[in-house]
Image (spheres, coloured by chain):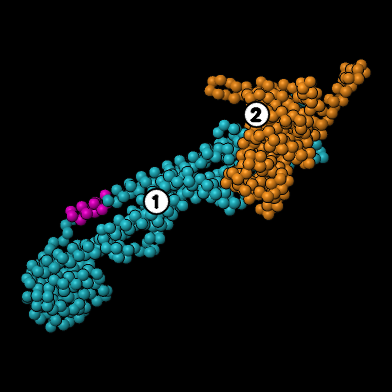
Chain colours: A orange, B cyan
């Protein structure tokens, strides 16, 4: 403590750093964190070969933040993503969602986490092909214990919100890719989760449709203060992200704020 | 600082966040909804499942047609067996009495119950084969022992009565007075050996069916039964493998769907319900179709070689229903057993698989 006090006296810059540190600590203590990844390692065994997909990742994501995780294929991006969503268990280290260590949860609580706390959006949409758009959206509500009538009303509301109020009764095959992803977004938001995990949400969409999906996600993020974590290759995503986490070789390479990236992009353009 | 105490979970006093208590339990949707989902799944895949579904249908068809056929066989073969018996009875009568034209034959039947189809066939046969024959009776046995005038000039007496009756003293005495008469006795034993005896001489004209013959017939029937059971067993095995295959296909096909369901908060029990109900829908629908086609096949088979009215008339409603119910239960049970392995695979899937793009 002594040295840090001296530092603040020495330079104003250090004072700012301390403030940032205190912010960070207080946000942690006050549980402003949606997700905390604590020294997570993940090792896959492929026969005799060990693959170290994650090698000591630390990450804190605040509530209401829009985060993009960027990185090349094989960087551990997807693995990290799965860890944060409670879809996979780390070999060592901890993952906290809303300050709860998800490794401690029993299967039913994990299901509840996936149902109520986290909404998933997939690259391939993953709508249930035998169900209509509305039924797809109502499904997680049914798991959450909502009555059919409640789910019906809420489902129509949220489909209207994503611009598909007229297409409730359509099956996924009768919808375009962009519309399917809108249904998937509606489904992810169905139980008003704290966190949305979007895995390459624009990966299977053309440029224009992808842009619309990104805008929709960002709007929902603003409206509902839902934390959005998105794994992506799509540079359009960077525009709307609060922070960008670059992953390389199973580690967090750097974390950038949008402001900085804009400058970088600006530089590049010049 | 964080790294030094990573295991400490900060629990803020104000909000519920940070505590496991905020976590509730996931419920399964109502059973009706699960059944509807499973049904929709089957219906949507039926096009591709049709071959394996036909496997179930085939298995149940075998079972059903085997059961229906054995019923028809009994009903249709009985008259032809009876016909053979009547024929041999007539032959004995001819041999003892000679030409039956213008002869007097007395037929005696028991008091208590009607003598049944065999007697009717026999009388019909007599009328068909001997013209101007005088048939007296059928006379009830109580009356037959009282009225001796009945037997005057009788060439033959056909007694349609149990063995013990023939041994009553009054009957023994009576037959002694009937010098010319040949007495045929038929014992209505359900398993067949009918006896003709010459009561006057106290000997049997036709021997009973020998024990050896009886045993052989029994063995034949047993072998036939075993063969049928073996066929049914094999066809059910084929059906079970078919259902397992169909469900495995549906699991691999729905790798992503099942993982997605888990991402949406589905419990393993939900997946289990879904798989088993789906299998039950497959099994039951297959069994329904199988019973229908089984009945049809066995009817067509029998009608092609026997009289249609006789075959159709031989079908006994409640018995048929019982056989149908057996088939449905068997179809269901086979389907549920077949679902065990694919369900285990589905349950073992991890939700992260939903993220995979290359499936």
The image quadrant of residue A51 is top right
- Image position of B116 with respect to B31: above or below: below
Which residues are drawn in magenta?
Answer: B212-223
Hey, which residue is sitting farthest right in the picture? A9
Between the residue at mark 1 and the residue at mark 2, the CA separation in whole angstroms equals 48 Å
Whether residue A36 is visible: no
The image quadrant of residue A196 is top right
Could you tell me which residue is drawn at 65 percent across and 32 percent down?
A203
Magenta: main secondary structure equals helix
The residue indicated by pointer 2 is: A78
Which of the chains bears the disc numbered 2? A
Q: Position of residue A117 (x, y in %)?
A: 71, 40
Q: Position of residue A140 (x, y in %)?
A: 66, 45
- In the rendered view of the protein, which quadrant contains the N terminus of chain A? top right
The residue indicated by pointer 1 is: B60
Could you tell me which residue is drawn at 26 percent across and 49 percent down?
B223
Which of the chains bears the disc numbered 1? B
| Residue B85 relative to residue A131: left or right | left
Q: Position of residue A134 (x, y in %)?
A: 65, 48
| Residue A42 relative to residue A255: left or right | left
- In the rendered view of the protein, which quadrant contains the C terminus of chain A? top right
| Residue B344 relative to residue B164: left or right | right
Could you tell me which residue is drawn at 11 percent across and 69 percent down?
B93
Q: Position of residue B304 (x, y in %)?
A: 27, 58
Q: Secondary structure at mark 1?
A: helix
Which of the two marks, 1 or 2, is nearer to us in this view? 2
């Amino acid at each position: 403590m002594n040295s840090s006090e001296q530092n603040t006296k020495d330079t104003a810059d250090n004072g700012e750093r301390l403030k940032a540190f205190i912010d960070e600590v207080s946000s942690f203590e006050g549980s402003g964190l949606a997700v905390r990844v604590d020294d997570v390692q993940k090792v896959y065994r492929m026969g005799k070969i060990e693959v170290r997909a994650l090698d000591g990742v630390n990450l804190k994501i605040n509530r209401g933040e829009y985060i993009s995780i960027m990185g090349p294929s094989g960087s551990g991006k997807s693995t990290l993503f799965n860890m944060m969503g409670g879809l996979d268990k780390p070999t060592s280290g901890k993952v906290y969602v809303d300050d709860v260590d998800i490794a401690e949860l029993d299967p039913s609580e994990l299901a509840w986490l996936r149902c109520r706390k986290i909404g998933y959006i997939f690259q391939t949409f993953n709508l249930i092909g035998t169900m209509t758009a509305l039924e797809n959206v109502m499904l997680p509500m049914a798991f959450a214990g909502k009555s059919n009538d409640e789910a019906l009303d809420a489902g129509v509301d949220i489909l209207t919100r994503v611009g598909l109020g007229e297409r409730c009764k359509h099956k996924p095959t009768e919808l375009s890719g962009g519309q399917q992803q809108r249904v998937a977004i509606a489904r992810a938001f169905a139980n008003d989760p704290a966190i949305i995990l979007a895995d390459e949400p624009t990966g299977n969409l053309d440029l224009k449709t992808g842009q619309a999906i990104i805008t929709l996600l960002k709007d929902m993020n603003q409206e509902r203060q839902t934390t959005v974590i998105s794994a992506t290759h799509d540079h359009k995503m960077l525009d709307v992200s609060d922070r960008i986490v670059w992953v390389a070789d199973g580690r967090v390479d750097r974390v950038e704020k949008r402001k900085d990236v804009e400058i970088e992009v600006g530089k590049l353009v010049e | 600082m964080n790294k030094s105490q990573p295991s400490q979970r900060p629990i803020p006093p104000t909000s519920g966040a940070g505590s496991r208590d905020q976590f509730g339990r996931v419920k399964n949707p109502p059973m009706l909804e699960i059944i509807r989902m499973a049904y929709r799944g089957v219906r949507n895949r039926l096009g591709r499942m049709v071959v394996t579904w036909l496997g179930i249908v085939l298995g149940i068809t075998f079972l059903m047609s085997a059961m229906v056929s054995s019923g028809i066989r009994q009903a249709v073969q009985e008259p032809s067996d009876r016909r053979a018996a009547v024929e041999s009875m007539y032959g004995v009568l001819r041999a003892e009495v000679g030409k039956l034209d213008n002869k007097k034959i007395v037929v005696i039947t028991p008091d208590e119950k009607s003598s049944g189809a065999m007697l009717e066939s026999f009388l019909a046969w007599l009328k068909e084969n001997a013209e101007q024959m005088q048939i007296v009776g059928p006379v009830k046995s109580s009356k037959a022992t009282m009225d001796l005038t009945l037997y005057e000039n009788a060439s033959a007496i056909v007694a349609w009565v149990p063995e013990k009756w023939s041994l009553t003293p009054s009957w023994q005495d009576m037959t002694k007075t009937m010098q010319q008469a040949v007495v045929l006795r038929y014992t209505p034993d359900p398993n067949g050996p009918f006896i003709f005896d010459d009561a006057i001489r106290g000997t049997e004209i036709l021997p009973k069916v020998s024990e050896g013959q009886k045993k052989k017939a029994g063995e034949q029937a047993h072998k036939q039964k075993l063969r049928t059971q073996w066929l049914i067993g094999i066809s059910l095995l084929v059906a079970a493998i078919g259902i397992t295959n169909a469900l495995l296909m549906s699991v691999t096909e729905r790798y992503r769907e099942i993982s997605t369901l888990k991402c949406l908060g589905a419990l393993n029990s939900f997946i289990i319900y879904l798989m088993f109900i789906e299998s039950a829908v497959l099994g039951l629908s297959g069994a329904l179709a199988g019973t229908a086609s089984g009945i049809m096949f066995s009817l067509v088979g029998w009608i092609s070689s026997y009289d249609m009215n006789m075959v159709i008339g031989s079908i006994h409603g409640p018995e048929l229903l019982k056989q149908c119910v057996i088939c449905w239960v068997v179809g269901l049970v086979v389907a549920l057993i077949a679902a065990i392995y694919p369900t285990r695979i589905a349950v073992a899937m991890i939700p992260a698989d939903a993220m995979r793009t290359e499936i």
